[in-house]
Amino acid sequence: MTQTAISIRVYSFYLFLMGLGLVLVPNLLLHWFGFADTKDIWIRMLGLFTFTTGIYYFYASAHHQMAFYQATVIGRLFFFLMTIVFVFVFHQSLMLAVIGSVDLVGGLWTYATLKRYQP
């Protein structure tokens, strides 16, 4: 498995854990990150979407999907930038940017591994 595939695989495990947590015990995760409890179904739907996205990452890491790897760098950096926008423009908790920083670090890790394999 290449270093790029490993970075994608690790991120898939993060998505699996975060997704399962949001589906099964959303208020526990919300509490850890300093957000209010909710009974709204949308947090569990977000967890389901997150877990499902983890399946894509896991599959791509097993089948060396270079275009997917490249797209994840853009997507994860965009996700991080949008958390910054939410914090400063919409006056949300700084914890959103902390959560988004996982995407920043993961995206930069994948980018760095991709740069090593380019001719």
Image: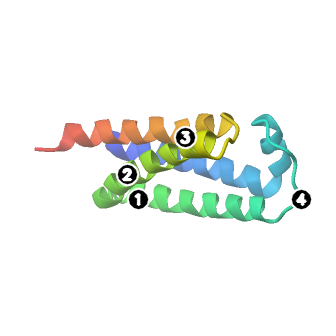
The residue indicated by pointer 2 is: 74
The residue indicated by pointer 3 is: 84
Category of crowding for the residue at label 3, using alpha-carbon neighbours closer than 10 angstroms: few (below 14), some (14–19), many (at least 20)? many
User: Residue 51: image x %, image y %?
Assistant: 63, 58
Helix or strand or loop: what does disc 1 sit on?
helix
The residue indicated by pointer 4 is: 39
Where, quadrant-wise, is the C terminus in this rendering?
A: top left
Helix or strand or loop: what does disc 3 sit on?
helix
- Between the residue at mark 3 and the residue at mark 4, the CA separation in whole angstroms equals 26 Å
What residue type is disc 4 on?
A: Lys
- Between the residue at mark 4 and the residue at mark 2, the CA separation in whole angstroms equals 33 Å
Please identify, in this view, whether the residue under mark 1 or under mark 3 is nearer the observer. 3
Which image quarter: residue 55?
bottom right
What residue type is disc 1 on?
A: Ala
Label located before the other in sequence (4 or 1) = 4
User: Residue 44: image x %, image y %?
Assistant: 76, 61
Please identify, in this view, whether the residue under mark 2 or under mark 1 is nearer the observer. 2
- Image point 54% across, 38% down: which residue? 102
Side (left or right) of 19 relative to 105: right
